[in-house]
Image (spheres, rainbow, N blue to C red):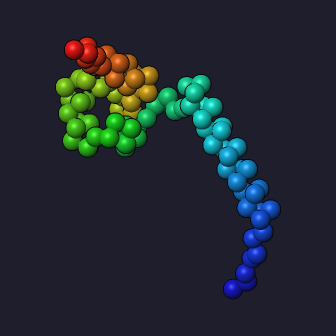
Amino acid sequence: MPTSIITTDDLRDFKLELLDDIKKLLTKQSQGKLKKYLKSAEIRELLQISPGTLQNLRINGTLPYTKMGGIIFYDADEIQNVMLANRINHKPD
């Protein structure tokens, strides 16, 4: 098995590429250019909820969704609107 020697220049180049990729992702996120439609697993991760809770939110009409070919998609903008509509502001005493 041949070995490869990694130099500090290689590591610096890798670091710069990684930072550039992270900057691009953050720029896309700040411009709202992330995915338009999310799958169930992505919604569960985003909202930190179980599959059963997600199913209940669909059944009771809390989360709008589209089903195509057995795959359920959620519009990211609609999820954001639901979160804002259900926001609770407590007034300080």
- Which of 93 and 83 lies nearest the eye of the viewer? 93
Residue 63 falls in image quadrant: top left
- Count of numbered badges drawn on the protein: 0
Quarter placement of the N terminus = bottom right
Q: Residue at x 34, y 23 (%)?
A: 83
Q: From the top left corner, tell me how far across and down residue 72 is, in percent.
A: 35, 36
Q: Residue at x 30, y 19 (%)?
A: 87
Quarter placement of the C terminus = top left
Horizontally, is 23 left or right of 84 in the view? right
Q: Which residue is drawn at 34% across and 27% down?
A: 65
Question: Can residue 70 be seen here?
Answer: no
- Which of 89 and 23 lies nearest the eye of the viewer? 89
Horizontally, is 63 left or right of 31 in the view? left
Relative height, residue 50 to residue 66 (above, below): below
Q: Residue at x 73, y 61 (%)?
A: 11
Q: From the top left corner, tell me how far across and down residue 24 is, in percent.
A: 66, 37
Residue that extends furthest to the front in the rendered view of this protein: 93
Q: From the top left corner, tell me how far across and down residue 62 is, in percent.
A: 25, 24
Q: From the top left corner, tell me how far across and down residue 7 is, in percent.
A: 78, 69
Relative height, residue 7 to residue 57 (above, below): below
Question: Can residue 28 be seen here?
Answer: yes
Residue that extends furthest to the right in the rendered view of this protein: 9
Residue 52 falls in image quadrant: top left
Residue 53 falls in image quadrant: top left
Horizontally, is 24 left or right of 30 in the view? right
